[in-house]
Image: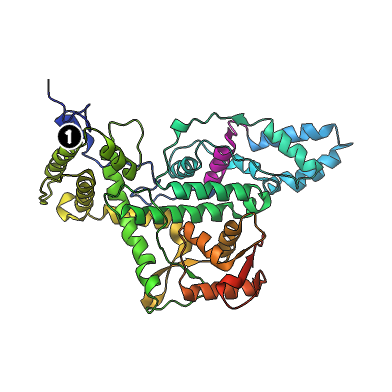
Amino acid sequence: MEEKFSSYIYPDFTKDELRRKIKSNPSSPFLPMNTRSDLFDWQVVVGNVLGAMLKKRIGKYTYDQFREDAHQAFKELLESDAGWEVLNKAYFEKKNVFNISPEFLMFYASKQRGTSARVSRFYSDILGPERIDFKNEHLNFLEKILAQTLEDHLEGVASLKGEHTPAYLPYMALLFKKDIQWLANHSQSFLREIQNFLSFYGFLYAAQLGLSISSLGSADEPVSKPLYFILESEKASLERTRVQEYGYKSYWEGAKKIFPVLTMNEMLQMNSPQSIPMWQLIQRYEQNPNREQIVSELNSFMDFFISERELEDQYEPVEDVSGVIKALCKLSERQFTDKRSGKSGVESKYASGIGLYFGKPFIQSRGRVGKVLILSHDIVLLLTNLAIGNNDKMRFCDVMKEFQARGVYLDKQSEQELIGFYERIGNVERLSDSGDAVYVCKTF
């Protein structure tokens, strides 16, 4: 009987079994894109996210069945079919019922597999098992009947903690849940902004993931890292150092590391029922009383990986967990830059997928300056309201701290442009010219 490859890392695999396992690069649950340019349907994603928030599903209940059930519910209240015809035309013919309350968007949900399902699962994992409800005090008498008719036909879904992949970026997950709850408390804003919200958070999450992953071998829990945007109305220039060095350039370099590092993360956890972020994996290894044996096995796997991928790299044995994990991640990157490997350029295709999935509204070419990260006025207003939250107003400098917590950084020029924008739309109170005495009011 063939001996197992190792005692701790791969106790279930022989060398031949491990060879077959790592022949292809495993997909990661921490980000939904792949190396193919598959598009997805935002309506389906929104519908699925609604189900994840409410912990309910539409099942086989159709829009036509809902219309008929609504007809029956109103029969006792209406004196004639003419009254129903008015309601049918007002709410159902052009699907205006979807503008009443977010719950109705669940009709867009789909059980089909594919890119839309993967993107939906990405947001569902960030949400976790907690339920998020909506406040619908604005509904009139008729709309409450429609909402109750739908509620009566939704199926409850039990959600267990083990069903969700842990967030790679816990701080972003907490902010995402806080912000989507705030939107849920303002249901009309939710209906108007949910696609912008999901798109922007998807891009910020992916961008911050790339920046975090760039710290190879780190066991520290990730925190927000500088990523500089400009407003869409601004001119870009080469003299703006932070925008040049820590804007699109920084984003792209980080994005190219995501696929190699997440791939290696999955390879190191092929024996585990559920993947955890690499920084947590390093903590787990470092805290293991058999740490020295684990480091030895990781070094053995490094030699095995170099041989299987036919890489020319040579590494001396590394004596600590962090160092050997860092070396393995670099090797994973090398397999995609070595033209002989047949995998050259895959990491760039994956990074391009991030832009295709989430980044189109936030990446723009500006002539000889090149690509920059931009914020549209709509996104600025959404982000401002999320930052202010349940307050009526907030000091501008504190609003900037809230932006940064979510991964949005502005240089001084952009901050002045932003204050000017706030003044033009009338939601700023300036007590002096200093940022400490400028208050920003919410607009929702």
For the stretch drawn in magenta, the main secondary structure is helix
Which residue is depicted at the point 18% across and 39% down? 295
Disc 1 packing (10 Å; few <14; some 14–19; many ≥20): some
Residue extending farthest to the right is 79
Can you give x and y, in whole percent of width and height, for residue 62 in the image? 63, 35
For residue 271, side relative to residue 173 (left or right): left
Which residue is depicted at the point 58% across and 62% down? 384
Which residue is depicted at the point 41% across and 48% down? 169
Which residue occupies the foreground of this view, 54 or 160?
160
Image quarter in which the C terminus is found: bottom right
Image quarter in which the N terminus is found: top left
Can you give x and y, in whole percent of width and height, for residue 197 in the image? 54, 54
Q: Is residue 68 visible?
A: no
Which residue occupies the foreground of this view, 290 or 302?
290
For residue 387, side relative to residue 365 (left or right): right
Which residue is depicted at the point 12% across and 45% down? 317
For residue 432, side relative to residue 414 (left or right): right
Rendering quarter of residue 345: bottom left
Magenta highlight range: 44-61
Which residue occupies the foreground of this view, 96 or 328?
328
Can you give x and y, in whole percent of width and height, for residue 285 in the image? 26, 38
Q: Is residue 54 magenta?
A: yes
Which residue occupies the foreground of this view, 407 or 156?
407
In this rendering, the answer to whether 88 lies above or below 354 is above
Task: Give amino acid for label 1.
Answer: Gln
Q: Is residue 30 visible?
A: yes
Residue holding disc 1: 293
Q: Which secondary structure lies at badge 1? A: helix
